[in-house]
Image (cartoon, helix red, strand yellow):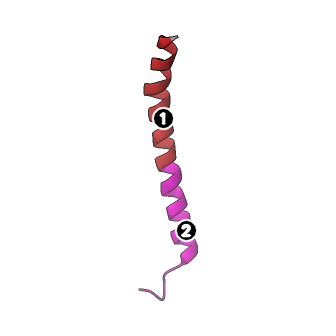
Amino acid sequence: MHETFQPRSALLLFLGMVLLFAAMWFGLYLTVLLPRGMTAF
């Protein structure tokens, strides 16, 4: 199993998960915090 392990695919998977997590938090920020800040003004 370790012979067929490719570091590049693991790095791409890690970057994909990080981007997905960042996109999720960005969407949460846009849908929750931004309208609340706009209604405060």
Q: Is residue 30 above or below residue 10?
A: above
Q: Which mark is residue 36?
A: none
- Residue 7 image position (x, y, % from top left): 55, 76
Q: Residue 25 or 37: which is nearer the viewer?
A: 37
The residue sitting at the right extreme is 8
Q: Secondary structure at mark 2?
A: helix
Tag 2: amino acid: Leu
Mark 1 surroundings within 10 Å by alpha-carbon count, few (fewer than 14), some (14 through 19), many (20 or more) = few
Residue 18 in the magenta stretch? The answer is yes
In space, the residues marked 2 and 1 are separated at their CA atoms by 24 Å
Q: Quadrant of the N terminus?
A: bottom left
Q: Residue at x 48, y 56 (%)?
A: 17
Measured from the top left, where is residue 28 in percent x and y? 44, 34
What's the residue at 48%, 84% (across, down)?
Answer: 4
Residue closer to the observer: 38 or 18 = 38
Q: Which mark is residue 11?
A: 2
Query: Which residue is the extreme one toward the front?
Result: 40
Q: Secondary structure at mark 1?
A: helix
Q: Residue at x 48, y 89 (%)?
A: 3
Region rendered in magenta? 1-20
Q: Reply above or below: 36 against 2.
A: above
Indicate the position of residue 18 as horizontal and vertical percent values. Answer: 50, 54
Q: Is residue 14 above or below residue 5?
A: above
Question: Callout 2: 10 Å neighbours few (<14), some, many (20+)?
Answer: few
Looking at the image, do the residues carrying marks 2 and 1 touch, with CB atoms under 8 Å apart? no
What secondary structure prevails in the magenta region?
Answer: helix
Residue 34: image x %, image y %? Answer: 50, 23
Going from N to C along the chain, the mark reached first, 2 or 1, is 2
For label 1, the residue is: 27
Amino acid, disc 1: Gly
